[in-house]
Amino acid sequence: MTTPHQGVHTASGVRRSTRRLDRRLAGVDEVLAAMRKGEGLHLQYENIRPHWSLSGGRNVAADTAALVIGNVSVAPVGDALFQGMPGQEWRVAK
């Protein structure tokens, strides 16, 4: 049994996937570079949705933030709003 997402990958499909991955990794690299310069990554909730931003004011996509906080050099520095929730401020560990 196959699903619509399985099968033969075309060259154009692989290029699209590669470009998407490259953009995502570039976003993670940009956020980490800003954090290494001293900016913090902040989480707040607006309309029941998580909103991530750098202390310099730049918004960060939720999927990018998830990859950034998964980095071993990034650590939470504050309390979470509720038990079991992610911290609300993240910094690069020095």
Image (cartoon, rainbow, N blue to C red):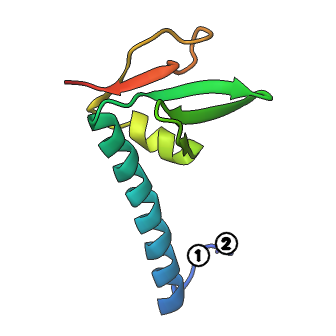
Placement of 65 over or under 84, stated as above or below: below
Determine the secondary structure under disc 2. Answer: loop
Q: Mark 1 — residue?
A: 6
At 46% from the left and 83% from the top, the residue drawn is 15
Q: State left or right for residue 31 relative to residue 8.
A: left
Tag 2 and tag 1, C-beta contact below 8 Å: yes
Q: Mark 2 — residue?
A: 3
Placement of 22 over or under 53, stated as above or below: below
x, y percent for residue 42? 51, 27
Determine the secondary structure under disc 1. Answer: loop
At 40% from the left and 40% from the top, the residue drawn is 68
> Is residue 12 among what the camera can see?
yes
Give the residue furthest to the front.
56
Q: State left or right for residue 11 relative to residue 30.
A: right
x, y percent for residue 80? 54, 12
At 43% from the left and 74% from the top, the residue drawn is 18
> Is residue 10 among what the camera can see?
no
Give the residue furthest to the bottom.
11
x, y percent for residue 22? 41, 67
Q: Amino acid at mark 2?
A: Thr
Give the residue furthest to the right.
47
In which quadrant of the rendered view does residue 35 lie? top left
**10 or 89, which lies in front?**
89
Q: State left or right for residue 37 relative to residue 84.
A: left
x, y percent for residue 70? 39, 36
> What number is the disc on residue 20?
none
Q: Amino acid at mark 1?
A: Gln
Label 2 environment density (alpha carbons within 10 Å; few <14, some 14–19, many ≥20): few
